[in-house]
Image: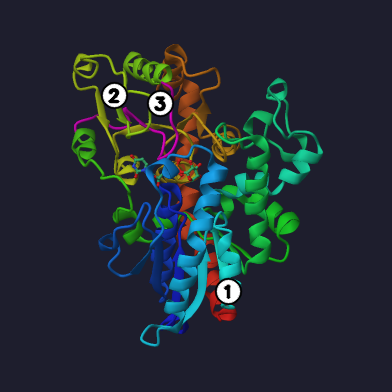
Amino acid sequence: MEQSRGLRLILLPLPFQGHINPMLELGNLLHSKGFSITIVHTKFNSLNPSSHPHFTFHSIPVDLSESEASIKEAGCLLSLINAKCVEPFRERLATLLSDAEEDPVACLISDPLLHFTRSVAESFELPRILLRTGGAASFAVYAAFPLLKEKGYLPIQDSRLEEPVTELSPFKVKDLPRLDTCDPESFYQLITNMANEPKASSGLIFNTFEDLEQHALATLRQNSYPNIPIFPVGPFHKCDSAASSSSTGLLTEDQSCISWLNTQAPKSVVYVSFGSIAAVKEAQFLEIAWGLANSNHPFLWVVRPGLVHGSEPLPDGFLESLNGRGHIVKWAPQKQVLAHPAVGAFWTHNGWNSTLESVCEGVPMICMPCFSDQMANARYVSHVWKVGVQIEHGIERVEIERTINLLMVEKEGEEIRDRALKLMEKANICLKEGGSSYQSLDGLVKHILSIKS
Ligand code: UDX
């Protein structure tokens, strides 16, 4: 891609783990196509430039105090980030655009939750492409929020949770995005604002692939954003070897996972992680611990700081009593873990990155969605791709033990495991020359060259 050499892209991630990882991975992909990459990041959750020496990093002086960073209300937190970033980003962009020493900037790539970037980019007449870090199916649900409100599904009523959403098969009311820490009206505003952003952009990128979310991508193209080009160019981390090896974690990865996994039998281990934000109550944490212990399968469990509301009440001697069958870490090298031959199942909260990483390694999932897009992702895993099962009846040790055994031992689990391997093959094919994501990436590069400022 000779035409992209000498051109620069400015990438601005939302400063949360599940959004940073895919943005940096996309940067790797576009770098492999010849662009130079400049990452603008906030002081809050700031990034480590040494993980990506081929990029240029610029920090903007946006920080959150401890009390601001711990705001539980997502709408408030995002409003704060949008308000605090606007001027520092405008100033930084002015400097970057006027720097004659650097390659000229072709466009800005940012997150649709950072809506302030619209006015800033417009003021410099800089084209803006959006990277939606979640999946296409969940985004189609977000885009349908006004319809869901009109039809009475929103705000969600507890008495209707099991009802199908006939306009959005295969979802039930309980699969619709919600955030318990956000009041329904603010959440509605947050989502509709985000879903409107692509309409004012030059394109929308997804970390997904056609074969995985064909129907949702078609719905977005035909109904929601008929005038906006959509590029499913994922799974990002599998497109480029640099992406899967470089750590972008805000927490330090504990490599003891890998040496522990090396001592375990093939496909015997349940890997348990609920991503970077989800939290459980103390009582649920105990049920998880006993469910894992009682299942009699080896397990690798990520208990990151903040996972438990309150303290971490593991009973004294819990791990010791398992004679090495359990291993607990604060943060794992997740992609390496999922690719390890000892891992037989992934108990996940179904954040989109975790879901996609599991699909790519053919690891079947135990789904325990917690908020926002995770419920829609889990429904796809269990009922569309059928590569996992949901914990449907509460976080209780007996239910956990039953679900793990269903997936790891029983006939139904065998069929699920087979499907997971077949889906992994599809993920591999889409990346090969001529595959859908391979072509979509070429389309994205051509598009950037055609819109460049
Ligand atoms: C958030 C939302 O929760 C999620 O629903 C949305 O799709 C993206 O933003 P998060 O909860 O952190 O993300 O989950 P997820 O999307 O799965 O991202 C977590 C990332 O952290 C993954 O890339 C995963 O590989 C990585 N991770 C997680 C580690 O590297 N080590 C760990 O121990 C746990």
- Residue 6: x and y in percent read 41, 83
- Magenta span contains residue 289: no
Residue at which label 3 appears? 309
- Residue 70: x and y in percent read 43, 39
Residue drawn 44% across the image and 44% down it? 68
Give the tally of numbered discs. 3
* Helix, strand or loop for disc 2: loop
> Do the CB atoms of the residues marked 1 and 3 lie less than 8 Å apart?
no
C-alpha separation, residue under disc 1 versus residue under disc 3: 42 Å
* Helix, strand or loop for disc 1: loop
Residue drawn 59% across the image and 34% down it? 379
Of the image marks 2 and 3, the number of the one nearer the N terminus? 2
Q: Which is in the foreground here, disc 1 or disc 2?
A: 1
Q: Which quarter of the figure is the N terminus placed in?
A: bottom left
- Say the numbered circle drawn on residue 127: 1
- Dot 3: within a 10 Å radius of its alpha carbon, few (fewer than 14), some, or many (20 or more) residues? some
Q: Quadrant of ligand 1?
A: top left
